[in-house]
Image: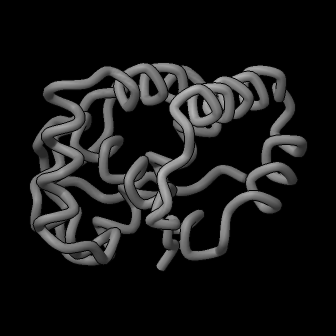
Amino acid sequence: MAQVSKRKINNKIESKMYETLWQAFSQLSYKGDIQLFLNDILSPTEKIMIAKRLAIASLLSRNYDYETIKDLIKVSQGTVAKIVLSLKFRNGYKIAIDKIARSEAAKDFWQDIENLLYRLGNPRITLASDRFIFARRTPRLNRG
């Protein structure tokens, strides 16, 4: 688990550090560059934590229930609840999810999730026109 020193940083220095971090992210526009940067600054555990949080937010935005999210992403109910609060009172996840949802990779991701859910025994949830409907059906075959 990541730890932060208990010694307090000067507020001006801390502010400048965050400004530099935000600037670094805003300057990276290619997936490969972003991956290299995140691999350098985050531990494997930190990357997993962030990826799981984003996945939870994405699933919640698509009306998945807590139990399905907990089983699929392997997280606690408390972790899901924290993301629910962030979605309710903040906008960061919403902005990212909206941008991701418009990409072709996101459509492939949701198709994979849908197929996985079907195989895990929950055939009621399906993806249609970027929203979930409830219907029994067979999963779509991957066309790749």
User: How many numbered marks appear?
Assistant: 0
Q: State how the image is colored.
A: one colour
Q: Is residue 38 above or below residue 103?
A: below
- Between 99 and 8, which is closer to the camera in this rendering? 8
- Between 82 and 4, which is closer to the camera in this rendering? 4
- Relative horizontal placement of residue 87, taking residue 27 as reference (left or right): left
- Between 123 and 44, which is closer to the camera in this rendering? 44
Q: Identify the residue at image location x=16%, y=36%.
A: 133
Position in image of residue 23 (x %, y %): 74, 22
Q: Is residue 110 above or below residue 14?
A: below
- Relative horizontal placement of residue 137, taking residue 85 as reference (left or right): right
- Between 112 and 135, which is closer to the camera in this rendering? 112
Q: Is residue 124 above or below residue 12?
A: below
Position in image of residue 52 (x %, y %): 42, 60
- Relative horizontal placement of residue 61, taking residue 28 as reference (left or right): left
Q: Identify the residue at image location x=27%, y=28%.
A: 131
Q: Identify the residue at image location x=55%, y=46%.
A: 9
- Relative horizontal placement of residue 53, taking residue 42 as reference (left or right): left
Position in image of residue 143 (x %, y %): 65, 50
Q: Is residue 58 above or below residue 91?
A: below
Q: Identify the residue at image location x=83%, y=22%.
A: 27
Position in image of residue 78 (x %, y %): 13, 65
Residue 45, picture quadrant: bottom right
